[in-house]
Image (cartoon, grey):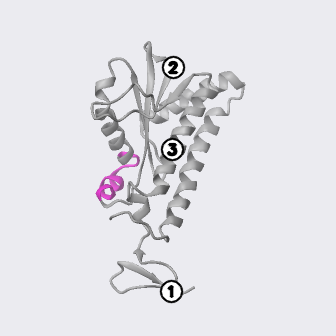
Amino acid sequence: MLVGQNNNNNALHSTSLPQVDAHSRHNFICKRAPGRTIQHHHLNELTARALSAASINNTKKPQSLCRSDGKRPNGLTLVPWQSGKPLIWDVTVVCLLAESYVALAAREPSATAEMAASNKTAKYAGLTTDYHFQPIAVESLGPANESAVHFLTTLGKKIAQQTGDERETAFLFQRLSVLVQRFKCVLLHDSFVHDDCPD
């Protein structure tokens, strides 16, 4: 198959594929891209399963718990997590290829994840009186926000207490890393398929 790049570097043309962004970034950035929705679901599932592995009962998308805008956190523990408060969490994956993030990402590693985590925390501020909120923001190229790293480290140790395997923390981070890498491949693949997402 022949693929060529035009002179102004804005688009690629193929004999059998649609015109796409020159850097194949659209599906990484578009919030309505199917791959990003599935990635979010799997990251949330990873968190819930890790809590269950630590014998911490939890539920995803709790029906009775909403922000002022009607949106719900990704999950809730059914037992106290810290300071007598149950844990609520919300996950997100930030794409560093978006033009609005490039300058910030270039200045400091994980800066974009920290910004996304701060935005999540502000959105759930109304629930923090009764719940301990944990944002889990992962950059598409690897780093997570600092509080998420601490949370996952603590969670890995709790899993280790159940299994007796001290490597559980490393395994948890490995699963997270593989998940992010896997869906980067999915999103790149989907960049070469017609979709109806607006730019």
Report the Cα–Cα distance between label 3 and label 2.
20 Å
Pick the front one: 13 or 108: 13
- The location of residue 77, given as percent across then percent down, is 50, 23
Instruction: Decide: is 102 above or below 8.
Output: above
The residue under the point 51% across, 19% down is: 78
The residue under the point 52% across, 27% down is: 59
Per the image, the residue denoted by label 2 is: 78
Q: Is residue 102 magenta?
A: yes
- The location of residue 143, given as percent across then percent down, is 46, 46
Secondary element type, mark 1:
loop
Q: Count neighbours of disc 1 (C-alpha within 10 A) and say few if under 14, some if 14 to 19, many if 20 or more.
A: few
Pick the front one: 82 or 188: 188
| Quadrant position of residue 199 | bottom left
| Quadrant position of residue 154 | top right
Q: Earlier in the sequence, mark 1 or mark 2?
A: 1
Q: Earlier in the sequence, mark 3 or mark 2?
A: 3
Q: Earlier in the sequence, mark 3 or mark 1?
A: 1
Instruction: Decide: is 84 above or below 133.
Output: above
Q: Main secondary structure of the magenta part?
A: helix
Instruction: Decide: is 122 above or below 77.
Output: below
Per the image, the residue denoted by label 1 is: 15
* Numbered label attached to residue 36: none
Drawn side of residue 1 relative to residue 137, left or right: right
